Amino acid sequence: MSTPRPGTEHDNDNDHDRMERGLRTLRRIEATERPGILDGFQDVAPGFGELVVGFAFGDICSRPDLELPTRQLVTVAALTALGNAAPQLEFHVRGARNVGCDRREIVETVLWLSGYTGFPATLKALGVVRSVFAAEGAGTDAPSAERSERALRTLRAPDGDGGVCEQVLASVRALDPALADDLVESAFGHLDPVTSRGGLDPLTRAIVSVAACTALGTLRPQLTAQVHAILDAGGTPQHAVETILQMAVYAGVPAAVNGLNAARDVFRTR
């Protein structure tokens, strides 16, 4: 029988705390008592689920300086930008809904990032979003003519980046008119076209931009600008740091390290 090395009792306590934190967070996201990741890979990688729960959700996503709904939008932004993890994106779109994000916030996150990610990634992500909305029965009612017209006026407003989003939606309409109409109405139908497009407040918009730029790993000037935007919108350095740290889970530690270096340069200049 092996003898525990000194200090391992404390390590075990820490591991237990990490798992408990991770399970509490993941239960909110997945809306189930036993998250599927715990059993999904037992046949090929026993213990992998516990590793994911402890690190991704216990160490990172349970940190207190970024609220869980915002963290879910951060994850949606990262997975939209990466474009190679549709099942995980679907999981986290559902998770965003489970923790209180509304449809407009999710759609606007994806549309807003089209300038960073390109239209193909945006279209792919919108298809995933649509499947989640359809599964939960959202967007099945026909939009009112007044709300649809208001949404189109908002998209066509000369200020902001409505032109970019209208191009994206034109591409969606060519593939699936019903999807385009539903996204227009749900994302923009409530908004006054004279004001900003809405859907996301300026701070959240900057946060999801930092997530996407960090995940992509090739947009340091844009990342730096969006860290400034977080601070300009009334956010704190910790908002930027927490967003970038979360990218260690979804885009890898090197991407997070590079993002933190860019953020540190911004903090020094401020």
Image: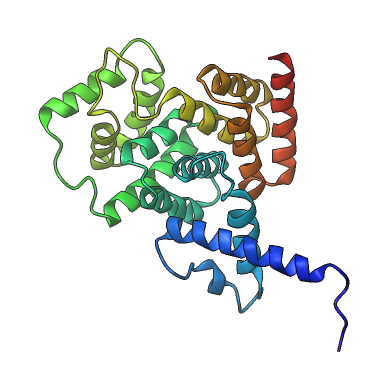
Note whether 254 is above or below 168 in the view shown: below
* Picture quadrant of residue 14: bottom right
Percent x, y of residue 47:
66, 72
Q: What residue is drawn where x is 51% and y is 43%?
A: 71
User: Which residue is at the far bottom?
Assistant: 1
Note whether 106 is above or below 150 in the view shown: below
Note whether 9 is above or below 149 in the view shown: below
Percent x, y of residue 162:
36, 19
- In front here: 51 or 91? 51
Give the number of callouts.
0
Q: Is residue 264 left or right of residue 85?
A: right
Q: Is residue 176 left or right of residue 217?
A: left
Q: What residue is drawn where x is 14% and y is 41%?
A: 142
Q: What residue is drawn where x is 16% and y is 28%?
A: 147
Q: Is residue 176 visible?
A: yes
User: Which residue is at the far top?
Assistant: 158
Q: Is residue 125 left or right of residue 172?
A: right
Q: What residue is drawn where x is 61% and y is 44%?
A: 246
Q: Quadrant of the N terminus?
A: bottom right
Note whether 215 is above or below 154 in the view shown: below
Q: Quadrant of the C terminus?
A: top right
Q: Is residue 213 visible?
A: no
- In front here: 200 or 223? 200
Percent x, y of residue 21:
57, 59
Percent x, y of residue 215:
62, 38
The colouring scheme, among rainbow, by chain, secondary structure or one colour, is rainbow
User: Which residue is at the far left?
Assistant: 145
* Picture quadrant of residue 155: top left
Q: Is residue 199 left or right of residue 72?
A: left
- In front here: 265 or 187? 265
